[in-house]
Image (tube, rainbow, N blue to C red):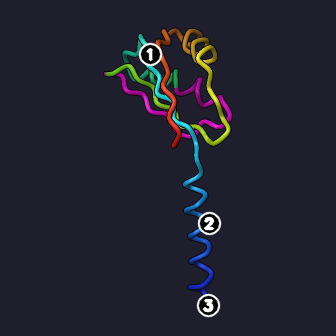
Amino acid sequence: MKRYLIVPLLLLWSLATLAAGTQYVMRVDGLACPYCAYGIEKKLKQIDGVEKIDVDLEKGLVTVNVREGVEFTEAQMKQLFKDAGFTFRSMEKKTL
């Protein structure tokens, strides 16, 4: 009996994890140290719907995964990075 309950629960869980979201890859100038990455992460985490943040200091890339329905604009990101002391260069959007 328990086995029959587990299968539907696993199916529901897997469907929830596959819900479409969006990934933004942003090129940013001025990222030089882990403290820089921390500052950016702190700013981005204040935005509702941000699920995952990855900062690649060597490449100057900030990758952000957001849940379905959350949209970033270039103007919004330009201001966010400017306020944090960095220069926003570009943004690429990918559907997950």
Front-lying residue, 63 or 71: 71
Q: Residue at x 59, y 63 (%)?
A: 13
Query: Neighbour class for label 3 at 10 Å: few (<14), some, many (≥20)?
Result: few
Q: Secondary structure at mark 2?
A: helix
Range of residues picked out in magenta = 41-58
Number of marks: 3
Residue 28 image-quadrant placement: top left
C-alpha gap between disc 3 and disc 2 = 18 Å
User: What amino acid does circle 2 point to?
Assistant: Leu
Give the label on residue 28, or none.
1
C-alpha gap between disc 1 and disc 3 = 54 Å
Q: Position of residue 46 (x, y in %)?
A: 65, 28
Q: Position of residue 86 (x, y in %)?
A: 49, 10
User: What amino acid does circle 1 point to?
Assistant: Val
Q: Position of residue 71 (x, y in %)?
A: 64, 30
Would you name the residue on which mark 3 appears?
1
Q: Earlier in the sequence, mark 2 or mark 1?
A: 2
Front-lying residue, 86 or 93: 93
Q: Earlier in the sequence, mark 1 or mark 3?
A: 3
Q: Residue at x 37, y 27 (%)?
A: 56
Look at the numbered discs 1 and 3 and tell me whether their residues touch, using CB distance below 8 Å. Answer: no
Q: Position of residue 77 (x, y in %)?
A: 58, 18
Would you name the residue on which mark 2 appears?
12
